[in-house]
Image (spheres, rainbow, N blue to C red):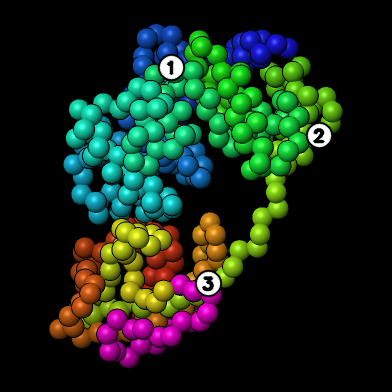
Amino acid sequence: MRDEEIGRALLDWYDRHARALPWRVGPEERRAGVRPDPYRVWLSEIMLQQTTVAAVRDYFRRFTERWPDVAALAAAEDGDVMAEWAGLGYYARARNLLKCARVVAGDHGGQFPESRDGLLLLPGIGPYTAAAIAAIAHDEPAAVVDGNVERVIARLFAVETPLPAAKPDLTALAARLTPADRPGDHAQAMMDLGATICTPKSPACGICPLRPACKAEREGIATGLPRKTPKKAKPIRHGIAYVGQRDDGAVLVERRPESVLLGGMLGWPGTGWAEAEPAPAPPMPADWRSAPGEVRHTFTHFHLRLSVMTARLPDATAAGAGQFLAPGDFRPSDLPTLMRKVYDLAAAALHDD
């Protein structure tokens, strides 16, 4: 199959089997003249970075109900946005989301740039996201290459160079296939093919629309592609978290500095995280007691083990560098996943006191 034949086969398949996603304008709607909203495309692409479609659906719905356009999001309180993001992970994305919304609202009249190059100038938008917005929202023939597309291209052309070294070749091959006509639908079709048929394990080659063109399937090596360079073992870091609760039920929390992991999110006072066991550093004098067990959490580059210390504090206790949240103002759901794990462990210990 020639490149243009591959493109036609892919779009014919997409027209019949496109996934219905809350941020997507499907092929029938596109034919009826409905245009994708760049705000919704941008928001979904930021949320989907290193996160699954299933995890993003409810977050996307809540965000767009609360902040239906970029101007509304730009005017939002930082804490409100961070609280809605809690649980999605990779919290620098949420901080950059606000920065980008405010630049678009303040410097671009609430309109996203239409070109990939213009989008790259915005905070938090890298090459992949810029290409995705330009292609899907503005029909620029930009090559959109995420993990699903890398897998499809590696198998289609039997690229055996391991990732990440293969990325430039895979991007060049994806660009070769990107048509001038319907590039946004083409990009989404590639994503859907990788997500539903050309899956990492047990790809459904028998029903793949690109099977006649797939070199890896002909050579019997599809399931082994793309190859990946073995990852180094992640180090383990340790820390201590302190959960203090006053007799009136208020809990001591802090807003984490922007410069650290989980920056801008609510959390618990504690030590830094290092490979050596940290020295105790309670936020204030109290009868701090060790909660049974430990909290385990994995970040991109390391595993974390947190010991949890709890204490009952008098009602008159001042917050020091943090703040006390009354029971009516404290929602565990506003915490990032790690800090919710800490709270769950601490709550059981405090209940037993």
- The Cα–Cα distance between marks 1 and 3, rounded to whole angstroms, is 45 Å
* 289 is within the stretch colored magenta: yes
- Residue 327 is situated, as x and y percent measured from the top left of the image, at 23, 68
Q: Nearer the viewer, residue 273 or 72?
A: 273
Few, some or many C-alpha atoms within 10 Å of disc 1 (few <14, some 14-19, many ≥20)? Answer: many
How far apart marks 2 and 3 lie (CA) works out to 39 Å
Where 28 falls versus 300 (above or below)?
above
Helix, strand or loop at disc 2?
Answer: loop
Cα separation, mark 1 vs mark 2, equals: 34 Å
The residue sitting at 75% across, 22% down in the picture is 214
**1 or 3: tag closer to the N-terminus:** 1
> Mark 2 — residue?
221
Task: Return the residue found at the far right.
Answer: 219
**Element under disc 1:** loop
Screen quadrant of the C terminus: bottom left
Sequence order check, earlier mark of 1 and 2: 1
In the picture of the structure, the residue carrying the numbered disc 1 is 139
Query: What type of secondary structure mainly makes up the magenta span?
Result: loop
Q: Which residue is mark 3?
A: 237
Q: Amino acid at mark 2?
A: Ile
- What segment is highlighted magenta in the picture? 273-294
